[in-house]
Image: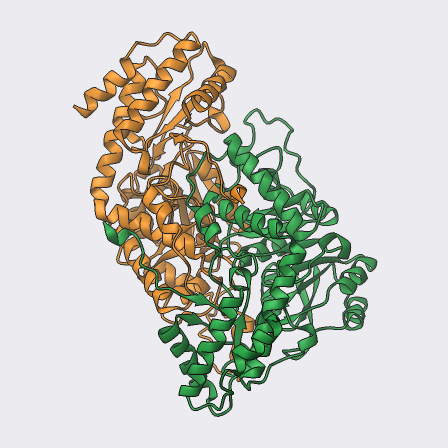
Chain colours: A green, B orange
């Protein structure tokens, strides 16, 4: 039965994510299951909560996993915070801002947006003006948007929102672990993430942290599932007066009761993904969050300088770029079609994946990541060496050795 | 860094699920990732679709995975089929029927229920009468409800629903692979499942199949995500006239476009869970679905006869019991507290988990599963041998060797 096992082609995933998983995380996933309420299971859940408090740099008790991809975490946050009719402000600076608009709007929010061109970020003043004009209940914003490679500074914005009594939600999927994120010191109410970027794990689990103000909003909407109520009709339901949350699966009030001391049955925890999430966080905590951010900065800089050294030009406001991904203009001589040929040649001949782009950048830039397990010197140098060969074969004028040489300068 | 790896205690999971994962499925999960649109990825997705068509015994093109636990699959089906105000009929015969009520109600449905006492199933006539009275758009029903161990016969009910122009949705999470399920021949429109029962995988992926009538309903509600639209405003959106689906993450119209030839970006597929789902289905298809059902029937019968042989009494209508789980009365001398002591002793001293119960059966029965990888002779006999010892130590009168002996009779 050899065909049950997969013969996966060797790939070095240097796109905007998902990226190559740290082998130690893969190994953790091969551990056998225990029962849902086994003491080992609940202690592993508690350990995982504690580890993610370190990842999010928070004291929030309510720090756990949503069982789904990072998008499930986003929707869990928004559907649990937003009551239909609530005003929500979304500053949009890339594709994932549009996603927040989309999800908030499906949650019944009255969504207001402000926008900057792709490749820029917002000033705190722009956000403050919008908050004063719109008076939203919630500010929802992305930290690092891989579609543009921009990293939105959040410290001032979160402070301003709090001063105006506005809740803040941040999607840190693509940035956390590779860019500073200080949940408590910035005063962000809810943050969600994913494993498949700087955390070096596979997609499929969404770490989340929820601060006290948001817990209050969500708990007020708590409704216990019909089939779980004690048939004696005891009053132990602890239900809130708020509007019931429109989703059951993504109902954070129920999920808090599942991860909390009540251990009230909700979904059946995806144990293998729990193991992966725990391992990814443990690796990050062992390294030290600050060290991990510095590592992403180092290898991101090496990649960036290497691309410049090849003679390519970079996209966007580099002073606000994420550490872990860079967008580089496809040489004009290639055009969009030639750009895809380069990506195909890298994949087919070198086993290296780099990213294409969405929306206004489609066919105009490649996106190259250096994140998680692949924020490594050998991954950077190999990618630059292969890219040089592929560009030369396509007739693009490149400096021989210029990419690897410039990156080596950064490492020296 | 030895603490990154987990030291999982050895457990034989003989409860109502999740159960011990087939080691070949665990191994599949340790394979490395490829990119989201890598040819290997898309071909693995297509292979997985084909395998689940065999599991669901269907020709439905739209057969794929929802990225979340089985509950995510249920909610994806209901939120995508139900437009607020739709009438939905849920025949409730256990906890998971209540869950369908709960989710359908959060989707804005006008939910109508019929109920039978826990331990019974519905006659086709009872469902037909309700359909004629309520005239629902959708009939939503569980096949195997582990809370009662009952397996609802569905062939007649699905035929009746179709004759009345009613869509049918079935939650087959706990039953599929261990009990017959004939999607096309019964005419069921949408079916969802999970890996953690008879499929021998971990929780975290929800296989789904969607027939043509349901595809039409769902496609009419298609809306393309804002950030994905071509900035040139080309008309290629293919959007439907129906009410937009309230969830983005669980929007089956979008998920169909992600798994289909358009490969339109939605979530980032949880690749490790895809590998697990593929392996679990491959193992089942290799064995043959009918053989797998027969295996579950054999070991389920051996467990049942073994429990009787120990002098215990069974719960529910045995002629409609699921093959893969049995509920047995906790001896009166033990009571609910003694019942929990037995479960703890089995876990602590023998590493064997059996299940407790919910709702009206709480403290009254244990639920013992024989499913997936654990539908095996050694698992059955070991469980019966250990249970005999624990019951004896608790002072319960049991027939020495009666459990294993009766099970061995079944195997002979």
Which residue is at the front of the view, A46 or B211?
Answer: A46
Residue A85 placed where, x, y %? 68, 59
Residue B281 placed where, x, y %? 30, 49
Q: Residue furthest right?
A: A163
Residue B210 placed where, x, y %? 35, 57
At 43% across and 82% down in the image, what residue appears?
A389
Horizontal side, residue A8 vs residue B301: left or right: right
Which residue is at the front of the view, A280 or A359?
Answer: A280
At 48% across and 36% down in the image, what residue appears?
B7
Q: Is residue B221 visible?
A: yes
Quadrant for the C terminus of chain A, please.
bottom right
Q: Quadrant of residue A138?
A: bottom right
Q: Residue furthest front?
A: A412
Question: In the displayed structure, would residue B67 be above or below residue B301?
Answer: below
Count of numbered marks: 0
Horizontal side, residue A320 vs residue A370: left or right: right
Q: Quadrant of residue A407?
A: bottom right
At 57% across and 47% down in the image, what residue appears?
A282
Residue B53 placed where, x, y %? 28, 55
At 32% across and 45% down in the image, what residue appears?
B24
Q: Is residue A354 visible?
A: no
Which residue is at the front of the view, B194 or B376?
Answer: B376
């Amino acid at each position: 039965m050899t065909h049950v096992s997969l013969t996966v082609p060797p790939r070095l995933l240097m796109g905007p994510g998902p990226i190559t998983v740290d082998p130690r995380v893969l190994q953790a996933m091969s551990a056998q299951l225990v029962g849902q309420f086994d003491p080992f299971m609940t202690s592993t859940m508690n350990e995982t909560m504690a580890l993610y408090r370190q990842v999010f740099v928070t004291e929030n008790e309510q720090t756990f996993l949503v069982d789904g991809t990072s998008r499930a975490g986003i929707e869990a946050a928004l559907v649990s915070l937003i009551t239909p009719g609530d005003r929500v402000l979304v500053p949009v600076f890339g594709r994932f801002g549009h996603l927040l608009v989309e999800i908030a709007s499906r949650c019944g929010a009255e969504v207001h947006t402000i926008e900057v061109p792709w490749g820029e970020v917002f000033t705190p003043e722009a956000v403050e003006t919008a908050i004063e004009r719109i008076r939203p209940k919630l500010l929802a914003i992305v930290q690092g948007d891989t579609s543009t490679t921009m990293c939105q500074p959040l410290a001032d914005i979160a402070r301003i929102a709090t001063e105006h009594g506005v809740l803040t939600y941040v999607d840190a999927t693509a940035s956390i672990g590779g860019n500073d994120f200080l949940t408590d010191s910035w005063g962000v109410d809810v943050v969600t993430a994913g494993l498949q970027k700087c955390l070096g794990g596979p997609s499929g689990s969404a770490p989340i942290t929820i601060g006290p103000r948001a817990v209050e909003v969500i708990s007020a909407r708590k409704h216990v599932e019909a089939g779980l109520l004690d048939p004696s009709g005891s009053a132990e339901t602890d239900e809130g007066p708020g509007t019931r949350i429109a989703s059951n699966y993504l109902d954070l009030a129920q999920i808090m009761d599942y991860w909390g001391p009540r251990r009230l049955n909700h979904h059946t925890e995806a144990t293998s993904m729990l193991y992966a999430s725990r391992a990814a966080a443990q690796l990050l905590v062992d390294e030290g969050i600050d060290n991990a951010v510095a590592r992403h900065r180092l290898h991101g800089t090496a990649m960036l300088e290497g691309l410049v050294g090849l003679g390519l030009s970079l996209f966007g406001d580099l002073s606000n770029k994420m550490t872990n991904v860079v967008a580089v203009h496809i040489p004009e001589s290639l055009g969009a079609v030639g750009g895809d040929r380069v990506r195909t040649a890298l994949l087919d001949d070198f086993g290296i994946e780099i990213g294409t782009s969405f929306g206004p950048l489609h066919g105009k830039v490649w996106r190259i990541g250096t994140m998680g397990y692949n924020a490594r010197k050998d991954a950077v140098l190999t990618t630059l060496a292969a890219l040089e060969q592929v560009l030369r074969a396509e007739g693009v004028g490149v400096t021989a050795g210029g990419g690897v040489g410039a990156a080596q300068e950064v490492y020296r």
